[in-house]
Image (tube, grey):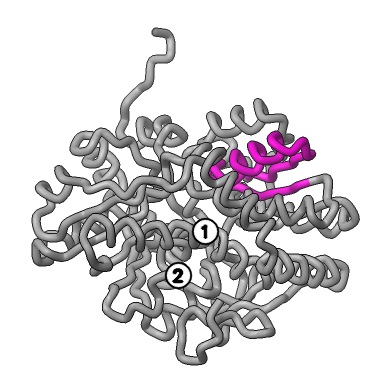
Amino acid sequence: MTDLKNSYMAGPDERGRFGDFGGRFVSETLMPLILDLEAEYERAKLDPAFWAEMDDLWKHYVGRPSPLYYAERLTEKFGGAKIYLKRDELNHTGAHKINNVLGQILLARRMGKTRIIAETGAGQHGVATATVCARFGLDCVVFMGAHDVERQSPNVFRMRLLGAKVVSVTSGRGTLKDAMNDAMRDWVTNVHDTFYCIGTVAGPHPYPAMVRDFQSIIGKEVREQIMEREGRLPDSLIAAIGGGSNAMGLFFPFLDDKDVRIIGVEAGGKGVNMKMEHCASLTGGRPGVLHGNRTYLLQDDDGQILEGFSISAGLDYPGIGPEHSWLHETGRAEYVAITDKEALAAFQICCEAEGIIPALEPCHALAHVAKIAGGLPRDHLMVMNMCGRGDKDIFTVAKALGVEIDMGG
């Protein structure tokens, strides 16, 4: 990583801070584990054998590089900008999550940990963690909110098929925030043999930077692929954001390219002006501390964390990664919100126009593409991260559209 003081790629600092955001707000019990993890990651970053194993698994197990696909019919439909989709939904397990999970579990093995825990919302991080644990013969426990267990039942079954224990979390509203709370409680209780595999660019340092570094394979590939296809860098990048790992993975390698416009798309739920009916932390929140880091959060006047809302389980989180908060405050990236209704419309458009069934998460990004592409010149190159496929969401979409799925054949 560069040490240039004027570089957006230089952070975090030695305290794990991106400006005023990030840090390590954890119990004394967890601090030694956090410091051990940081030290192991610093060693791994300089170890060619570690990256050789990562590269081999990314290529032969995950299926990277994922394609950069020119979405010709979407381009024609929206008019204006030339739209490319980074096809990370074609990865093994169906999303970007496995990029990061591989790295963390290789670290866990280096540290002698035999039990892996994870949180999951949409289930994709849980599936990826269960998959890699099966690959290496490790015990796996996945914490998932009871509400998400119900709406993401296909992924729950996949995790169990892969040998993971899925713990249904009934506290709070039974979504991603609550699953992360219970995972951290488990970690405190089982510090000796357990490694916590966090699925997004949040949590205490070094997680935000570490997850970003593993996910930045997305943006690194895009740089090479767009140069091969078009001979120049893209004019804009767009990605959906819950905690924000797929977005940071795409954005990070371009942060110092000042002519590249960067747009993150949050979950607007039923509308950002409706109290507790959205998950747009930057649009409708303010700074606070949650899950070991300082970042923008949905909270009331007393600092109590609010229960967000989104049709998308993977975006249903009342916070955001601290690096995104920093990019927001410095103005390097723009952040907007898209409603459930707009995301559902984009889902249908993508299916019918490109023959791609997307996850609800990237449909938020695609809905914003639909809003702005037509107002841009035809030589504008726009890259959107298609970070997950829609197998997991068909029942949710059918219910939202009032369609009954007949499973009887």
**Residue 294's x, y, as percent?**
61, 77
**Residue 75's x, y, as percent?**
14, 50
Along the line of sight, the residue nearer the viewer: 284 or 251: 251
Residue at image point 62% right, 66% down? 210
User: Badge 1 is on which residue?
Assistant: 215
- Residue kind at label 1, given as amino acid type: Gln
User: Badge 2 is on which residue?
Assistant: 252
The reply to whether the magenta stretch includes residue 42 is: no
- Please give the range of residues in magenta: 116-144
| Residue at disc 2, secondary structure | helix
Picture quarter containing residue 292? bottom right
**Residue 361's x, y, as percent?**
41, 49
Q: Is residue 288 above or below residue 165?
A: below
| Residue at disc 1, secondary structure | helix
Q: Is residue 64 above or below residue 211?
A: above
Q: Earlier in the sequence, mark 2 or mark 1?
A: 1
Which image quarter holds the C terminus?
top left
Q: Residue furthest bottom?
A: 5
Which image quarter holds the N terminus?
bottom right
Q: Residue furthest top?
A: 409
Distance in Å between CA atoms under marks 2 and 1: 9 Å
